[in-house]
Image (spheres, rainbow, N blue to C red):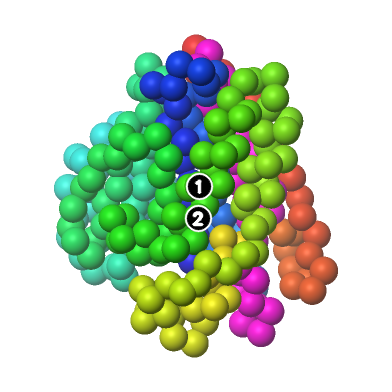
Amino acid sequence: MCIVFIYNGVNDVESEYSLILISNRDEHFNRPAQCMSPWIDDCTVYGGRGRIVSDYVRSEMGMTDYVECIHDYSMQCNEFVFLSVEIGNLTPKIKTYSNATDEVNQWTDTYLGFSNSLPNRPLKKVEAGKKYLKDICSRLNKTKDKSQLIDELIYLLKNNERHLPDNQLESRQPNLYKELSSIFVHIPKGKYGTRAHTIMLLSKSGHIDLIEISMRSPIDDENPYWERSEFQIDLL
């Protein structure tokens, strides 16, 4: 049950950031995974290998056109939410597509959050995380405070407070809704939970800081070792 939070600061005159995106990747601990790095066959791409995402980032299509191309395939998949952030002239264009509703939506809110629910029906932990993010970004919106900003964003992603009651989550996951109600998920008996944190900071000057903190495989779920990878990219 992955989770993503976004700060869209392009219209915030007090902020030196156009975009802050943070996420947790939740999955089974025994699933093979690699730390974030540039792809060997395409050094401009960083991250995962899922078909929908990998085909999209290697294409030159916008999100709406791409969704039309994969429509038949997406209708055969389990329910998912596809999140796209297109950065043109450092102005983020944030869109989601859900194959459950077959709809593309564009979002202009300053603070956004998405998880395993329809985008317009956020889980309680998503709402809570947006409030945490707002508090952080309203205080630490200058690049000189980047180190503290990153520390507080990591602390948010590691937050294990349970956000209950959540009737939507309970109806969908009646046996695990308590464990899944926190931003940071840890279910030792199922060998499942949050195994990677990702942070992307895009400044209004065009500089990107890309950070991933992930569990090293093979994972000792009682005493995991977290690896940190960092990349610097300039768009201008």
Residue tagged 1? 131
Left or right: residue 145 versus residue 126 is: right
Residue 76, quarter of picture: bottom left
Residue tagged 2? 128
Residue name at image x 55 percent, y 31 percent: 138
Q: Work out whether residue 195 can be spotted.
A: yes
Numbered label attached to residue 71: none
Cα separation between marks 1 and 2: 5 Å
Few, some or many residues within 10 Å of mark 1 (<14, 14–19, 20+):
some
- What amino acid type is highlighted by mark number 1? Lys
Magenta-colored segment: predominant secondary structure: strand
Residue name at image x 23 percent, y 53 percent: 70
- Residue 100: x and y in percent read 23, 65
- What amino acid type is highlighted by mark number 2? Ala
Observer-nearest residue: 2 or 131?
131
Q: Which portion, as a residue range, is magenta?
A: 185-214
- Residue 165: x and y in percent read 46, 74
Observer-nearest residue: 229 or 16?
16
Residue 81, quarter of picture: bottom left
Q: Do the residues labelled 1 and 2 touch (CB within 8 Å)?
A: yes
- Residue 63: x and y in percent read 27, 40
Image height of 13 relative to 78, above or below? above
Residue name at image x 56 percent, y 33 percent: 137
| Residue 210 lies in the magenta stretch | yes
